[in-house]
């Protein structure tokens, strides 16, 4: 089943374009997180990045076992982050 992305231009709330996305979805928990977040993947991960709310990008400290990735979040400041995994939809997490 295709995953669709909705694009909005300007201040209008009317959809202006819909694009099919072939990226994979992932399950992740706990969210909000403290020391770590686990992400269940359909295929192995090769590249994981974390983006801060200010747009700073850095490599994630992670391990992978049986297509479940565990990302260390203990050293992150409290706030909202986006996790990018190559080939997957982006994930929004909250660090408490």
Image: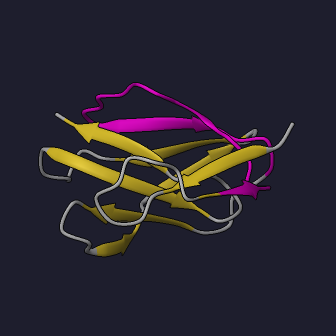
Q: Is residue 77 left or right of residue 1?
A: left
Q: Nearer the viewer, residue 4 or 73?
A: 4
Please state the horizontal and vertical placement of residue 31, each as a whole percent of the image: 36, 28
Residue lying at 51% horizontally and 60% vertically, measured from the top left: 84
In the rendered image, the vertical position of residue 79 relative to residue 56, given as above or below: above
Q: Residue furthest top?
A: 30
Viewer-proximal residue among 46 and 89 = 89
Percent position of residue 57, x then y: 33, 74
At 75% from the left and 38% from the top, the residue drawn is 66
Q: Is residue 38 on the magenta stretch? A: yes
Against 29, residue 66 (above or below) is below
| Image coords of residue 37 (percent x, y) | 42, 37
Give the position of the N terminus as an image quadrant: top right
In the rendered image, residue 15, in percent from the top left (x then y), is placed at 52, 50
Q: Residue at x 33, y 65 (%)?
A: 10
Image vertical order of residue 67 relative to residue 77, above or below: above
Between 80 and 62, the one nearer to me in the picture: 80
Which region shows up in magenta?
Answer: 18-43
In which quarter of the view is residue 34 placed? top left
Q: How is the image coloured?
A: secondary structure
Q: Quadrant of the C terminus?
A: top left
11 vs 66, left or right, is left
Q: How many marks?
A: 0
26 versus 59 height, above or below: above
Extreme left residue here? 78
């Amino acid at each position: 089943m295709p995953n669709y992305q909705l694009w909005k231009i300007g201040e209008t709330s009317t959809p202006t374009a819909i694009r099919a996305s072939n990226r994979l979805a992932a399950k992740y928990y706990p969210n909000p997180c403290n020391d770590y977040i686990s992400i269940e993947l359909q295929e192995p991960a090769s590249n994981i990045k974390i983006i801060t709310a200010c747009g700073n990008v850095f490599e994630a400290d992670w391990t992978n076992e049986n297509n479940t990735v565990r990302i260390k979040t203990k050293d992150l400041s409290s706030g909202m982050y986006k996790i990018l995994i190559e080939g997957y939809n982006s994930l929004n997490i909250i660090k408490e």
